[in-house]
Amino acid sequence: MKKKQFLFTVVCFIFCIILTSCSQKSTDNKDEAQTNEKKEDLILAVGNEPEAGFDPTTGWGRYGSPLFQSTLLKRDNNLKIVNDLAENYEVSEDGKIWTVVLRKEVKFSDGKPLTAADVKFTFETALNNGSVVDLNIMEKVEAADNFTVKFTLKEPQSTFINNLVATGIVPKHAYSKDYAQNPVGSGPFELVQWDKGQQLIVKENPEYYGEKSNFKKVTFLFLNEDAAFAAAKANQVDVAYIPASFSKQKVDGMKLEDVKTVDNRGIIFPYVKSGDKTEAGHPIGNDVTAEPSIRYAINIAIDRKMLIDGVLEGYGTPAYTSVDSLPWWNSETVIKDGDLEGAKKLLKDAGWKDTDKDGILEKGSLKAEFTLLYPADDTIRQSLAISVADMMKPLGIDIKVEGGSWDTIEKKMYSNAVLMGWGSHDPLEMYNIYSGENAGVEYYNIGFYKNETVDQYFEKALKATNEEEANEYWKKAQWDGKTGLSVKGDAPWAWLVNIDHLYLVNEKLDIGKQRIHPHGHGWPVTDNLVEWKWTE
């Protein structure tokens, strides 16, 4: 009874929202009007509300299309970098000067022209805002003329190109403290109405220079996963983002779209032995996980397919690095997993024995036991942690799982294993979570992993002057045949799964080719929104 009442409440709520956003129809032509509305309008429930608003200089649009703004460059559906606002760009031989030539005759949605001055203003504003948009590598940005922008970097950095991909351009003339609430841009859509906590309505931007959307209006409903599923069952939305736990339920008029991702989950191990402390006084290191044999054994003993089937209802892929299937991924990092006998032999050869017959291995005075932390409000991470701990019991490794708030985890994460999640279209993330320079910095390299050869590959990748050259060094950092950051090398992580993103989609709607999605922030499914179309 409670479920039916909940469903009824949700549907009524959604229906009221939709009524307020729909224009009045002629009663004489009601059926025809409803058909036309369906072909020109979309209603989506694809993620959380961006509470900070729609300002790219503070981070909007970095996990999905910025909708209202366009960017200098963009990634296509194969993740190749192509021009957007830029006609072309070039990088100086020393890798420090990036020159971008803009399209002519581009206009913002208010009809004003977009020029190099707007690009300069955007990047200077983003730098001064000091937000998640990391532009500290940039020394200055200049408007050489109306349609030429020159970026000067403090030192070469190949990944600077991702700032040109991810940062939507804002208009200097229309930017104010209220811009995030009332964005003006040169993207495919413009804002009509934002009812905070409920919905966002956008319409086609008639000034947009690129491929036009097939929809005149798109409404985003801000619903949690339960409510989004209920809305899909009631045929009140055209697309709904759902968890794997709902994936087996058939919904009339809807099809299930299964999108591959690099939205990964893995275990980061304290890589060094105990003894040190952070500046805040938190302990660093763990004598058990500092043992390479423990990390290797766990990695090869984990049955990733079983995790996918048991925790993710079959919707996921095995994870071996933080960048699986991306252009800079080294496919040689794939290992044979679920190998309990191989793991047992590895541990035995390394000197681990169960001398006291309690089911837990020892090596001298060291017992093969440690704690694995996870955020208590995340049921998927909890299930993964418990499953991995169960898989290790036959090996004689005792993993104690412990849920807690991030505030609690922060105090313990340098000396205990943690179940983390990452996943980005920017290879700089790999540098952030593995480089020696980032040891102990925020949530990055909390295991204090360091490999000088890996760091040298990182340096070469960053100093490369094109993406192809950089990718070769990113791949070698993972595994060069002798060493690397993957399980074939040092195994500072045990990567588990990449979580598929699941959407219930109107069976008559084509959402095009979805590129590999990043970690689950923002609305990555909207990256190709202008390609969506009705099939009937």
Image (spheres, rainbow, N blue to C red):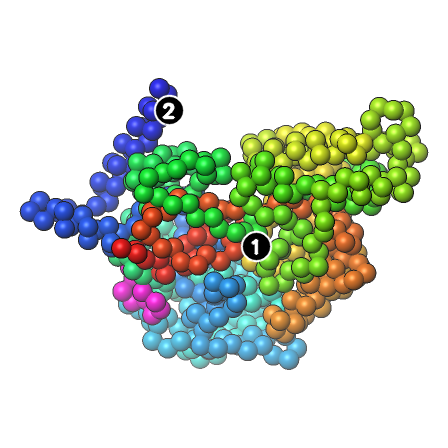
Provide the secondary structure element on which disc 2 rests.
Answer: helix
Residue that appears at 40% across and 76% down: 103
Q: Principal SS element in the magenta part?
A: loop
Circle 2 crowding by C-alpha within 10 Å: few under 14, some 14–19, many from 20: few
Q: Is residue 215 left or right of residue 153?
A: left
What amino acid type is highlighted by mark number 2? Lys
How far from the left and from the top, in percent, is residue 416?
Answer: 74, 36
In this rendering, is residue 38 above or below 343?
A: below
How far from the left and from the top, in percent, is residue 170?
Answer: 41, 62
| Whether residue 235 can be seen here | yes
Q: Which residue is mark 1?
A: 424
Q: Which residues are magenta?
A: 202-212
Provide the secondary structure element on which disc 1 rests.
Answer: loop
Residue nearer the viewer, 169 or 203: 203
Q: Which residue is mark 2?
A: 3
How far from the left and from the top, in percent, is residue 50?
Answer: 43, 46
How far from the left and from the top, in percent, is residue 235?
Answer: 30, 40
What amino acid type is highlighted by mark number 1? Ser
Residue that appears at 46% across and 56% down: 514
